[in-house]
Amino acid sequence: MKAIICGAGITGLSAANFLSANGWDVTLVERSAGPRPEGYMIDFFGSGWQAATHMGVIDRIREVGYDVNRIDYVDSNGRSTAHLGYESFTKVVGDRLRSILRPDLEQAIREVLPDSVELLYSTTITSIHDSSAAATASGGKVDVELSDGRRLTADLLIGADGIHSDVRSMVFGPEADYFKFLGFHVGAYSFRDNRVKDILANRYAITDTCGEAMFFYRLRDGSISALGVHRTDRRERPDDIQQEFRERYRSLGWLCPLALEHCPKSFYYDQVAQIRMPCWRRGRVVLLGDAATAVSLLAGQGASLGMAGAYVLADELAKHAQVPDALAAFEARWRPQVAEQQKAGVSAAKWFVPADRRALLMRRLSMRLIKVPGVSRLVSGAVVGKIGAAL
């Protein structure tokens, strides 16, 4: 059986690994010229941890990940206004939690990619003819044309090319039909500054602010990972993201002006949104990860869901003789899990970056309540969710 996967991020690489392990011949197509260095720190746990265990990369994730002591919310002078120890979460997930940079997680998966997987960088899919149109001519195969002029025929095409998926646009219609903007923009970059490095220590430091917030973490090489999230009614990306960042975050005080001195002209920047689709499959084409089910940065677990979804898809393809039957079973099994996490993402938007001082004070109160015996497990359990059920 032959599969073509569009997108060599966490989801696409995971799908390539799991399908190849089940005997599939896999071609992986990626627009970028090589592995992408941009990315922010994520908390990796939940169903993705189980999937990573099946893949055999857990030890590597533990090695390159970080043990964070606590989350500190700070005012414009750097004083802590609220904090949360990571033990609140480890009580629920045990040691199955690691903070890790997205590029490092991608690299861990890429390292175990079998040699049999054909990985094509600087390549896009320019046309798709799925089985519903090509069944008579090619026995239900899916035919694609690549930007390098090659034509490939496969039993399955997986669109794992992210929230702005080209496969989704070509097969299912315009992005606007499925794109739910949540009212935030986000940007992330890393920089070096000894003045900042010495202040952070082993913690997430977050500005305790309304409307916009910056997040900082010191990496083991001494550089600083910075992420900014701000509320906005403007859906489109600004023309000058560097100017936008500097104007939006300079007034937050503390380390922000220093960090903004290092803000580059080009860095990761995007809208915070979800993808809502009534169906993820058509013929022999299926969408996976953010292309089908983006939950948003606010919900977290996007990487975890991408890996776990890839495992579930491969598992259903192994169980069913016919690809369309496997795709239907995959969606029936995985959709309830994703819907739960998307719902959590919309709810999280209310406190992730508070809209006003009242919401900010409520967040501070919640952070204090989580330290109360019994409440900690309840709140942390709500954050962790039940997303592992499908595995």
Image (cartoon, rainbow, N blue to C red):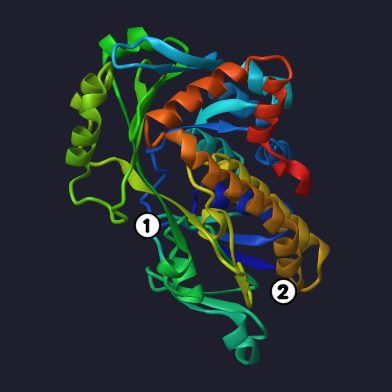
Q: Position of residue 54 (x, y in %)?
A: 74, 40
Quadrant of res 195: top left
* Residue pictured at 35% horizontal, 20% vertical: 223
Q: Position of residue 35 (x, y in %)?
A: 42, 44
Q: Position of residue 30 (x, y in %)?
A: 44, 56
Residue 324: numbered disc: 2
Whether residue 262 is visible, yes or no, is no
Q: Earlier in the sequence, mark 1 or mark 2?
A: 1
Q: Nearer the viewer, residue 32 or 160?
A: 160
- The CA span between labels 1 and 2 is 30 Å
Q: Is residue 237 above or below residue 243?
A: below
* Residue pictured at 37% horizontal, 38% vertical: 38
Q: Nearer the viewer, residue 33 or 374?
A: 374
**Quarter of the figure that contains the N terminus:** bottom right
Whether residue 197 is visible, yes or no, is yes
Q: Is residue 311 left or right of residue 123?
A: right
Between label 1 and label 2, give the one nearer the viewer: 2
Residue 367: numbered disc: none
Q: Nearer the viewer, residue 162 or 247?
A: 247
* Residue pictured at 21% horizontal, 41% vertical: 244
Residue lying at the far front of the rendered structure: 358
Which type of secondary structure does the marked residue at label 1 adopt? loop
Kindly identify the amino acid type of the residue bearing the numbered disc 1: Ser
CB of mark 1 within 8 Å of CB of mark 2? Answer: no
Q: Position of residue 221 (x, y in %)?
A: 39, 17
Mark 2 burial class by Cα count in 10 Å: few <14, some 14-19, many 20+: many
Residue 122: numbered disc: 1
Kindly identify the amino acid type of the residue bearing the numbered disc 2: Pro
